[in-house]
Image (spheres, rainbow, N blue to C red):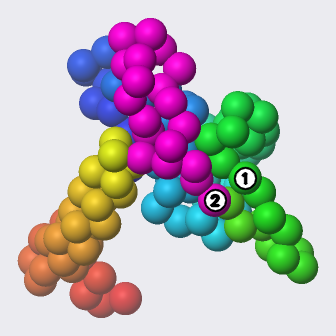
Amino acid sequence: MSLPDVSSGSWTLLTGHGHVLVEIARNPQARIRDIAAAAGITERTAQAIVADLEAAGYITRTRTGRRTRYTVNPDSPFRHSAQDGLRVGPLLDTLTAMADTEKPAAAARSHQPGRAGSSRGS
């Protein structure tokens, strides 16, 4: 997820909770530090958000050895009355599918010869 353009203001469309939930949906085995980096928040904030999401039933945590695996409950309802009756699953499906298809294209553009961010000479 890219950071917002500073010139457009300081708000984003999704909250920290939304960014964390999308990242967990994309990568159920992500570490807290990976989730925090993707969401643009601190690890402490990511831990608090994961705890909120778990307490609300949006995710479950399963420990396997030293690793944690997260499972998203796609049937969880949105918390705002404007989305009454809607479930988070379809939105997460859309956002994760878009992120998965856009990342390879962005990576390919940054590695083309003669372009900024190219890996030539490394």
Q: CA distance from mark 2 to mark 1?
A: 5 Å
Residue furthest to the bottom: 121
Q: Where's residue 122, x and y in %?
A: 37, 88
In this rendered view, identify the residue nearer to me: 88 or 37: 88
Residue 23 part of the magenta segment: no
Residue 87 part of the magenta segment: yes
* Secondary element type, mark 2: strand
According to the picture, the residue beneath numbered tag 1 turns out to be 60
Residue furthest to the top: 81
According to the picture, the residue beneath numbered tag 2 turns out to be 71
Q: Where's residue 4, x and y in %?
A: 33, 32
Q: Where's residue 37, x and y in %?
A: 57, 51
Q: Residue at x 22, y 63 (%)?
A: 102
Q: In the rendered image of this protein, does residue 48 appear above or below residue 61?
A: above
Residue furthest to the left: 114
* Secondary element type, mark 1: strand
